Amino acid sequence: MDNTHNGRKVLIVGNVNDERRSEGFVYVQDFSPSDRVLQALKKLGLFWGIAILSILIPVFHFVTVPLFFFLGLFFAFRSYKAEGKVLGGETVCPHCQYPVKIKSTELQWPLSEICQNCARVVRMERKEVV
Ligand SMILES: [Zn+2]
C-alpha cells in the first residue's frame, strides 16, 4: 500500500554524526488534536487487549498483565505527543551514498534509519527553509 503522496513533503538533512550531510525528503501526515487522541486510544486498546489476554497465561500473568498495562500507558502517551506520522521517504547515506528508505513511523524529530549498506545510523533533521 503506497499512500506516501497523501502527506505533506518535508525536506530533511541527514547526518552520521560528522560534518557530512545528505539531502532527502519525507512525506508527513500532521495529526489534528482529535487524531492524536484517537491514536493514543488505539495504542491503549492494543496493549490493554494483550494485558487481558495474558491473564490466561499461568504464572507469568503476574508479570505480563501489569507490564502490558503500563506499556499501554507509555505508548499511548508517546502517541499523544507525536505531531504526526511519517508516511515514508528517501535520503542517501552521507557516508556511502547508498539510498536509504525511510519507513512509516511516528513523527518524532530527529528521525533515524539504519543504512542497509554500511550499517551506520543516519539521523535526519528538518531542513531549515529560508
Ligand atoms: Zn551507508
Image (cartoon, rainbow, N blue to C red):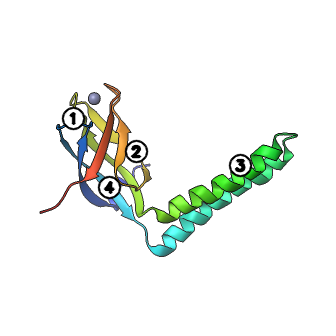
Farthest-out residue, left? 130
The residue where tag 1 is placed is 94
Q: Amino acid at mark 2?
A: Lys
Q: CA distance from mark 3 to mark 1?
A: 39 Å
Q: CA distance from mark 4 to mark 1?
A: 20 Å
The residue where tag 3 is placed is 67
Q: Is mark 1 within 8 Å of ligand 1?
A: yes
Left or right of 85, for residue 68: right
Q: CA distance from mark 2 to mark 1?
A: 18 Å
Secondary structure, mark 4, is strand
Farthest-out residue, right? 58
Whole-percent x, y for residue 84 in the image: 41, 62
Pick the residue in front: 103 or 75. 75
Q: Is mark 3 within 8 Å of ligand 1?
A: no
The crowd level at tag 1 (other Cα within 10 Å; few <14, some 14-19, many 20+) is many
**Residue 37 occupies quadrant:** bottom right
Q: CA distance from mark 4 to mark 2?
A: 10 Å
Which of label 3 and label 2 is nearer to you? 3
Q: Quadrant of ligand 1?
A: top left
Whole-percent x, y for residue 5 in the image: 32, 57
Whole-percent x, y for residue 48 in the image: 71, 57
Which of label 3 and label 1 is nearer to you? 3
Q: Amino acid at mark 1?
A: Pro
Q: Earlier in the sequence, mark 4 or mark 2?
A: 4
Q: Earlier in the sequence, mark 3 or mark 2?
A: 3
Q: Residue at x 35, y 58 (%)?
A: 28
The residue where tag 4 is placed is 27
